Image: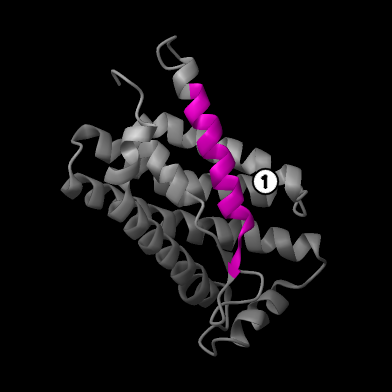
Amino acid sequence: MSKKFLSIDRIARIGVLSALAVILMLLEIPLPFLPPFYKIDFSEVVVLLGGFSLGPLSAMLIEGFKILLFMLFKPTETAFVGELANFIIGCSFTVPAAFIYQKHKTQKQAIVGMTVGTLIMIIVGGIMNAFVLLPTYAAVFHLPIEELIAMGTSVNASINSLTTFVLFATTPLNLIKGVVCSGIVFVIYKRVSPFLKIKNH
């Protein structure tokens, strides 16, 4: 990375945004129509703001520092697998959105970027949950995978297998997160961007 990228100004902004993101990440909200261990947070709002103003690589760094700071407040319960998956899923949303927006910084491009990012997050989130997160949670807590699926069935009768769990629990969670975070960023970005951008960037 160039010296220009590693300027004190950029590092300071990445640090502040990472701290704000972890505060939002700690404010997890359960959703009544999803299994109890599925909670939503809106930390990606801050990561998106950073990505739009500082670029996709900065978004990835904010996402990474957010996870590291989060683990200081809430130690891992999944041997870091959950935190790694959270980082990958978060980056799958924010990095593509920031990359697309950086090409042409218009409202239309921002909408395209966040839409593409949301779709990628839904796909990556589904894959990560089906093949990494849910099997890991089952192993760590010594539960058959069927018990986790049963938690989904208790709130949605359509959930009766790993595939339907991903379709009717994981997908709605990431869709809601993507839409809400994108909507918030769309409304506030122009107002806060002057405080986030680096001079001559």
Q: Quadrant of the N terminus?
A: top left
Q: Nearer the viewer, residue 182 or 155?
A: 182
Task: Specify whether residue 22 is painted magenta.
Answer: yes
Q: Secondary structure at mark 1?
A: helix
Placement of 128 over or under 2, stated as above or below: below
The residue carrying mark 1 is 70
Q: How many numbered marks appear?
A: 1
Which quadrant is the C terminus positioned in?
A: top left
Image location of residue 46, percent across then percent down: 46, 46
161 falls in the magenta region: no
Q: Is residue 53 visible?
A: yes
Give the colour scheme of this rendering. Answer: one colour
Q: Position of residue 149 (x, y in %)?
A: 64, 78
- Chief SS of the magenta region: helix
Which residues, given as a range, are shown in magenta? 11-29
- Disc 1 packing (10 Å; few <14; some 14–19; many ≥20): many
Q: Residue furthest right?
A: 142
Please tell me which residue is depicted at 44% across the width and 31% down the height of the picture.
58
Q: Is residue 168 above or below residue 155?
A: above
> Residue 152: x and y, percent?
60, 80
Residue 151's place in the image compared with 45, above or below, is below
Residue at position x 24%, y 47% in the image: 110
Front one among 22 and 156: 22
Residue at position x 47%, y 43% in the image:
91
Residue 140 place in picture, x, y as percent:
79, 60
**Front residue (pair 76, 148):** 76
Q: Judge whether 58 appears above or below 38 on screen.
A: above
Q: Report the amino acid beneath label 1.
A: Phe
